Amino acid sequence: MQLAAPALADGTIDFAYGGRITEANGKPVEGDVALKITFFHDKDGQTEVLSVTEGLGKITLQQGIFQFRLPLPASDYDKVFKSADQPVWIQVTDLTHPQKGPFPLQQVMVMPYAAKVPVDGITLSFNNEGKLTAGPSSAPGANQFITKDSQGRLVWGTPDTSAAALQGQSVSTTAPASGQVLKFDGTQWLPTTMTSGTLTGVNVSAPLVNSGSATVPALSIARAASVSDGYVSSADWLTFNSKQAALGFTPVNKAGDTMSGGLNMSYIKLKDNDGTDNYLRLNANPAMTADLSYTFPASDGTVGQVLTTNGAGTFSWASGASVSGTAGGDLGGTYPNPTVAAVGGATAANLAAGAALANAGASVNTASTLVKRDATGSFAAGTISM
């Protein structure tokens, strides 16, 4: 069903619309019918824009074909066709035969005319049931094909099995004998008997092997091995197919592998081997502002040795820490042999004097006296009040 180009008339816009109504088997409906047309803006028919029955109460069908002009007021036209790019669908309902229900939606296309498929009565035609047919009405015979006769009608034809030339070269008129083949002799195609010969040898290249003789060859191929070519078995193929694509480098993936060059990692995790998930993690200090490189000793140290640095990134083993320099705090002198300068704030001299006083048999050492330290840090005999 197609919608013709609109024509303006007396403030209305006429649309010439046509279609064809048939039975379920394709037979055209005849007689008069009452129609209703409904316009939609969606192809699913959910949004009805306009429905019209006026002027469509008696439409005459000819071989199922109907045509009518539908005058639309300008307001209805603008409602249906809002703009040039507004898609519009139309649905026709046969009110005379309501059991048919509404016909499927058709998108409105502006066409010069709406008509059935044009036929010439020779190649295309409508049969008595209104069905479009092409070609001959009879069934073809074996090995027939469809072609045109001298009048242009489609007919069944039988191919001509005779040929006067192949690829522009003449074919001999001599009838072939059983087992002969067609052979070109440089001038024409001739039926020829193939000549037989004797096999004198078979040359093969590895991995093919001829285990037979020169006249009765027996060709075989062995299964490929690590050092020889051959066929790939299904088991080999499955093994090969399960491998991942080439990495482009040699991975370190087993004990004993070695690698060279730099390995960029932010940390190293050393997992224990007791079956738990505990690990030792070595981290690079995120506060570093420059690259650091450390070189460790080439061998293990001895008992008691410690790891020291030369300040340039090289570590070495050392036997204890050698202390040097000026002593401080309660010690005096220099390392490695400092002297005791004070104890608890008391000088060594005062401590020695106090000890001498405590051990001396002086007259001041009377009963109930003791050695005590005064506010200056000196020691002398004295008493305490209880």
Image: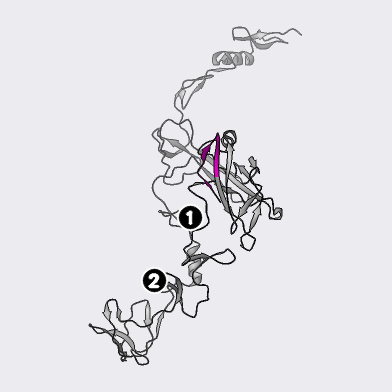
Give the SS element for disc 2. Answer: loop
Which residue matches tag 2?
A: 227
The amino acid pointed to by label 2 is Val
Whether 69 is drawn above or below 135: the answer is above
Corner quadrant of residue 82: top right
Front one among 21 and 40: 21
Question: Quadrant location of the C terminus?
Answer: top right
Q: Earlier in the sequence, mark 1 or mark 2?
A: 2
Front one among 70 and 324: 70
Front one among 321 and 87: 87
Residue shown at 37% from the left, 76% from the top: 207
The amino acid pointed to by label 1 is Asn
Where residue 329 sits in the image (x, y, percent)?
53, 19
| Residue 47 appears anywhere in the view | no
Which residue matches tag 1?
A: 253
| Residue 119 appears anywhere in the view | yes
Corner quadrant of residue 371: top right
Residue shown at 69% from the left, 54% from the top: 97
Q: How far apart are marks 1 and 2 (CA)?
A: 25 Å
What secondary structure do most residues of the magenta stretch adopt? strand
Q: In this view, does 149 lie to the left or right of 267?
A: left
Residue furthest to the left in view is: 187
Q: So how many labels did they put on this image?
A: 2
Corner quadrant of residue 182: bottom left
Task: Identify the magenta region.
Answer: 1-15
Q: In this view, does 351 lie to the left or right of 195?
A: right
Where residue 341 sits in the image (x, y, percent)?
52, 18
Where residue 133 sits in the image (x, y, percent)?
53, 66
Front one among 170 and 91: 91
Residue furthest to the right in view is: 386
